[in-house]
Structures are given as structure tokens and as C-alpha cells.
Image: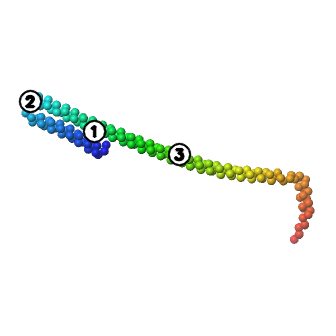
């Protein structure tokens, strides 16, 4: 409750109590019999209570109306905040997907280059003529015979 609402409620209570006290005081000093005075006090108390309950009902319905309005405003604010949060999450998710797509493309390019190099290496290996072991031994003997003797020191 706000200060204004508390102040209004305090005034209402003060009004009811003051009305009851005034009615009782007026009746007590009026020249009537005890029975008449008691009936009149009871009647005034009932009237004052009805008036107080009426004002209380008005105040409580106003409070309920205010609470309902504030609840609706709060619901709208919560819904707006939720929509902004969902939008932000969607934007971040889109950016992540975009980055992942770019990185995937780069990875595919690297794989393609590596595959090309592997294929070129295979072709190079296949283009070399096979050498027989006997031919290799003859070549190595011939190179030893052709080499000039090392000079002794």
C-alpha cells in the first residue's frame, strides 16, 4: 500500500470512530430515558457502521481495481521483456550458425587442397618407373668403380 492509500484508510477509520464518539456523546447528554438512549445509541452505531462499511467497500473496490490495472501493466512489461529476450537469443543463434557456416566452408576448402596434393603425390609416385633390385646393385657397383680413388694423406 502506498502512503496515500494508508492515509485514506486512516482517515476513514478516524471518521468512523469520531462519528461513533460524537453520536454517543450527543445521546448521553440528551434528556431521554435510559432505554430510549440505549436504543438511540444502538441505532446511531448501526448507521455509522453501515456508512463505514459502505466507504470501506468503496475503498476496497478502488484498491482491487488499482491492483488489477497494475497487474495488467506488469503482465505487458513481462511479455515485452520475454519477447526481447527471445529476439536476442534468436539473433545470437543466427550469428553462431552464420559463423559455423563460414568456418565449415573454410574447412572444406582446406580438405579440397589437401586432397589435391595427395592426388598429385600419388600421380608422381606412380610416374616413377620401378627399379629392379639387381639393376640397383649394378648401378651402385658402377658408381663405385667410376669414382676416383681417394688421395692418401
Q: Which of 9 and 68 is in front in this view?
A: 68
In the rendered view, does 133 fall on the left or right side of 124?
right
Earlier along the polypeptide chain: callout 3 or callout 2? 2
Mark 1 neighbour class, 10 Å CA radius: few under 14, some 14 to 19, many 20 or more: some
Label placed on residue 90: 3
Q: Position of residue 14 (x, y in %)?
A: 21, 41
Q: Which residue is drawn at 86% across and 53% down?
A: 129
Q: Give the labeled residue for mark 1.
A: 59
Label placed on residue 33: 2
Give the number of the mark in front: 3 or 2: 3
Say which quadrant the C terminus sits in: bottom right
Q: Which of 120 and 69 is in front in this view?
A: 69
Picture colour scheme: rainbow
Q: Where is residue 104 in the image (x, y as percent from the top left)?
A: 64, 49
- Farthest left residue in view: 31
Mark 2 neighbour class, 10 Å CA radius: few under 14, some 14 to 19, many 20 or more: few
In the rendered view, does 92 fall on the left or right side of 52?
right
Quadrant housing residue 55: top left
Q: How far apart are marks 3 and 1 (CA)?
A: 46 Å
Q: Distance between the residues labelled 3 and 2?
A: 84 Å
Q: Where is residue 119 in the image (x, y as percent from the top left)?
A: 76, 51
Q: Is mark 3 on a helix, strand or loop?
A: helix
Using the image, determine if residue 137 lies above or below residue 89.
below
Amino acid at each position: 500500500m502506498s502512503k496515500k492509500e494508508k492515509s485514506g484508510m486512516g482517515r476513514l477509520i478516524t471518521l468512523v470512530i469520531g462519528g461513533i464518539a460524537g453520536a454517543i456523546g450527543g445521546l448521553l447528554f440528551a434528556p431521554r430515558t435510559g432505554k430510549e438512549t440505549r436504543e438511540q445509541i444502538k441505532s446511531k452505531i448501526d448507521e455509522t457502521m453501515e456508512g463505514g462499511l459502505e466507504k470501506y467497500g468503496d475503498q476496497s473496490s478502488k484498491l482491487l481495481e488499482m491492483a488489477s490495472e497494475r497487474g495488467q501493466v506488469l503482465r505487458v512489461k513481462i511479455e515485452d521483456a520475454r519477447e526481447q529476450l527471445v529476439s536476442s537469443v534468436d539473433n545470437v543463434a543466427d550469428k553462431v550458425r552464420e559463423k559455423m557456416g563460414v568456418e565449415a566452408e573454410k574447412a572444406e576448402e582446406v580438405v579440397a587442397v589437401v586432397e589435391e596434393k595427395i592426388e598429385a603425390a600419388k600421380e608422381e609416385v606412380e610416374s616413377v618407373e620401378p627399379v629392379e633390385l639387381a639393376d640397383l646393385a649394378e648401378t651402385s657397383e658402377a658408381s663405385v668403380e667410376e669414382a676416383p680413388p681417394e688421395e692418401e694423406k
